[in-house]
Image (cartoon, grey):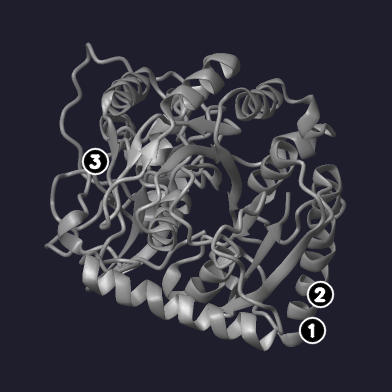
C-alpha cells in the first residue's frame, strides 16, 4: 500500500546515461522502439541469453517537457530510482525471459530498418543489467551482498520520520496524542468504558495506513492495552511485507529505532523461531529495511507503554496468492506452518506476557489499483465483503478468515490477509470485538479500508 510520501525529486533520479532527469536530452533515434544511447559493452561481461526484467515498480511520470518511466526497486537493491524514456516501454515488455537477446535485436532492427539498432539493444540490456534491473547473476551477487550487510546490523533505523510522522520527539508526542484523543472520543461515543491500567489483551488488529490518514484508528486499538509499566511485555508483531514478492515470511533480529528510543528485539525468541523455520527465515530480511507496517506500530507502542519494557518479535508476512492459484491453503505451506508452530512453542516455553498483533489494512480498491473510479454502491459492496471476513476473524477463526477472502479470489486486495491469519493461528484467541471500521478515500477515486479489533485471553 502506498504511504503517500512526497514525489521523488529529479535530483534523486538517474538515467542510464548518468544524466539527471530534467536535463537536456539528445534527439532519440528513429527506431520504433526508442533506446537511450549506450556506452560500449565489455565483451567479457556476459549478458543473460534470455533477459528477464525482475519485479520492479514502473510508473509513467512527466518531468518538465519529457515523458519518462520512473523505475523503483521494492527490495532497495538499486541505489536510486531510474528514469527511462517512455518509448522504452515496448522493449521492457519483451524482457520476460522468453525472448532471446538475438531475437530482441532482430525485432528492433525490423521496426527501425537500421542495422545499428541491434547494437543499441545489446547496449540497452547491458545498461539495465548494470543498474541491477535484470534477474541475472550480477543482480544475485548484489542482492546477496546487501542481505549479508543488512543482517549484520543491530538496529533497524526508522525511515519515515518527517515524511509520515514528525521526527522531533516533542512534535511526535503532540501528533500521537492528538490521535489518542480522537480515539478516546470514538470509544466514548461507542459507549465503551476505559480499560484498566493492567488490561492485557490477547491480540490486536491495528491498521498500518499512513498515520496522517488513519492515526485515530491505529490509536483506537492501543487503547485496549493498559498503561501499567509492569510486567515486561513481549509483542509478537506480524506486519505486511509489501516488498515480499516471492516468500511468505521474513524475520529480523534487529532492535527498532524510534524518536522515543529503541524497542529491543526479543533475540532468544527470534533465534528459536528462525532455527525452526530454517533458511527462509532471513532469505528476504532486507524488506524490513524500508517496510512501514512495523515502523508505525513501534511509535504507538512506545507512546502508549511509556517506560514499560517492551520486547519485539518482528515478522513480515507476504501474500497468499500463490497458494490461491494452486488451490492450496496456508496449512499446506511448510515454511509458514513452521513459523506458526515455532511462535506458539516459544510463547509457551519462554516466560513473560505476550501480546499478538497484526499490523494490517484491508481492501485496496479504485483507480490507483486498476479499478474504475469508486461510487457509493461499490464502496458498500467492499464494506460488506470486509465485514464478512472481519466477522470470521472476530470469532478467532483463522481458516474462516482465509476462506472469506479466498471465496472471492481476493478481488479487493486485502493486504493484511496473511498477517491477520498468522496472528489468529498463533494467538488462538477467544471471540473479540470490532472497535472501528473505516474507508479512507483518496482524491483519485480510490480507497483503502481499515479496522481495529481486540481479542481477550
Work out whether residue 443 can be spotted: no
Residue at numbered disc 1: 377
Q: CA distance from mark 3 to mark 2?
A: 41 Å
As rendered, which of 79 and 151 lies closer to the eye? 151
Q: Residue 381 shows which numbered tag?
A: 2
Mark 1 in CB contact with mark 3 (< 8 angstroms):
no
Q: Quadrant of residue 375?
A: bottom right
> In the drawing, does residue 6 fall left or right of residue 212?
left
Q: Which element carries disc 2, helix, strand or loop?
A: helix
Please report the residue visible at 33 percent of the width from the left and 25 percent of the height from the top: 151
Q: What residue is pinned by disc 3?
A: 79
Mark 2–mark 1 contact, CB under 8 Å?
yes
Picture coordinates of residue 162, whole percent (x, y):
25, 66
Residue sitting nearer the eye, 411 or 89: 411
Q: Which residue is at the far top? A: 44
- Which mark's residue is nearer the viewer, 3 or 2? 2
Alpha carbon separation for disc pair 2 and 1: 6 Å
| Crowding at mark 2 (Cα within 10 Å: few <14, some 14-19, many 20+) | few
Disc 1 element: helix
Picture mark count: 3
- Residue 283 seen in the current view: yes
Within 10 angstroms of label 1, few (less than 14), some, or many (20 or more) residues? few
Residue at x 79% of width, y 80% of height: 380
Q: Is residue 14 above or below residue 183?
A: above
Amino acid at each position: 500500500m502506498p504511504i503517500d510520501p512526497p514525489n521523488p525529486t529529479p535530483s534523486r533520479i538517474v538515467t542510464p546515461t548518468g544524466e539527471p532527469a530534467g536535463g537536456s536530452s539528445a534527439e532519440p533515434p528513429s527506431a520504433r522502439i526508442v533506446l537511450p544511447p549506450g556506452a560500449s559493452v565489455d565483451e567479457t561481461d556476459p549478458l543473460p541469453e534470455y533477459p528477464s526484467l525482475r519485479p520492479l515498480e514502473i510508473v509513467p511520470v512527466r518531468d518538465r517537457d519529457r515523458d519518462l518511466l520512473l523505475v523503483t526497486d521494492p527490495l532497495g537493491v538499486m541505489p536510486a530510482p531510474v528514469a527511462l524514456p517512455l518509448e522504452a516501454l515496448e522493449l521492457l515488455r519483451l524482457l520476460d525471459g522468453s525472448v532471446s537477446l538475438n531475437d530482441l535485436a532482430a525485432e528492433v532492427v525490423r521496426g527501425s530498418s537500421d542495422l545499428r539498432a541491434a547494437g543499441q539493444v545489446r547496449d540497452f540490456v547491458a545498461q539495465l543489467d548494470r543498474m541491477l534491473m535484470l534477474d541475472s547473476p550480477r543482480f544475485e551477487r548484489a542482492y546477496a551482498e546487501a542481505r549479508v550487510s543488512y543482517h549484520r546490523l543491530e538496529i533497524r533505523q526508522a525511515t519515515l520520520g518527517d515524511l509520515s510522522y514528525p521526527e522531533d520527539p516533542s512534535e511526535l508526542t503532540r501528533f500521537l496524542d492528538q490521535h489518542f484523543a480522537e480515539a478516546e472520543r470514538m470509544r466514548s461515543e461507542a459507549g465503551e468504558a476505559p480499560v484498566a491500567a493492567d488490561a492485557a489483551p490477547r491480540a490486536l488488529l491495528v491498521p498500518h495506513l499512513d498515520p496522517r490518514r488513519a492515526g485515530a484508528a491505529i490509536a483506537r486499538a492501543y487503547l485496549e492495552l493498559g498503561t501499567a509499566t509492569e510486567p515486561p511485555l513481549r509483542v509478537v508483531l506480524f506486519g505486511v511485507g509489501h516488498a515480499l514478492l516471492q516468500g511468505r515470511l521474513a524475520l529480523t533480529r534487529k532492535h527498532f529505532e524510534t524518536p522515543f528510543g529503541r524497542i529491543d528485539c526479543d533475540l532468544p525468541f527470534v533465534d528459536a523461531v528462525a532455527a525452526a523455520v530454517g533458511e527462509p527465515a532471513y532469505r528476504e530480511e532486507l524488506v524490513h529495511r524500508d517496510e512501514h507496517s512495523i515502523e508505525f506500530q513501534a511509535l504507538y507502542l512506545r507512546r502508549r507503554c511509556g517506560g514499560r519494557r517492551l520486547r519485539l518479535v518482528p515478522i513480515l508476512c507476504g501474500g497468499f496468492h500463490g497458494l490461491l492459484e494452486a488451490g492450496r491453503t496456508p496449512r499446506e505451506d511448510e515454511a509458514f506452518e513452521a513459523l506458526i508452530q515455532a511462535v506458539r512453542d516459544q510463547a509457551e516455553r519462554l516466560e513473560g506476557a505476550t501480546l499478538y498483533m497484526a499490523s494490517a489494512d484491508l481492501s485496496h480498491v479504485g483507480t490507483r489499483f486498476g479499478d474504475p473510479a469508486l461510487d457509493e454502491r461499490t464502496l458498500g459492496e467492499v464494506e460488506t465483503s470486509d465485514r464478512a471476513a472481519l466477522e470470521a476473524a472476530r470469532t478467532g477463526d483463522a481458516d474462516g478468515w482465509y476462506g472469506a477472502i479466498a471465496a472471492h479470489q481476493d478481488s479487493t486486495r486485502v493486504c493484511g490477509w496473511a498477517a491477520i491469519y498468522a496472528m489468529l493461528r498463533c494467538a488462538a484467541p477467544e471471540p473479540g470485538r470490532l472497535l472501528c471500521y473505516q474507508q479512507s478515500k483518496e482524491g483519485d477515486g480510490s480507497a483503502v479500508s481499515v479496522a481495529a479489533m481486540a481479542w481477550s485471553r
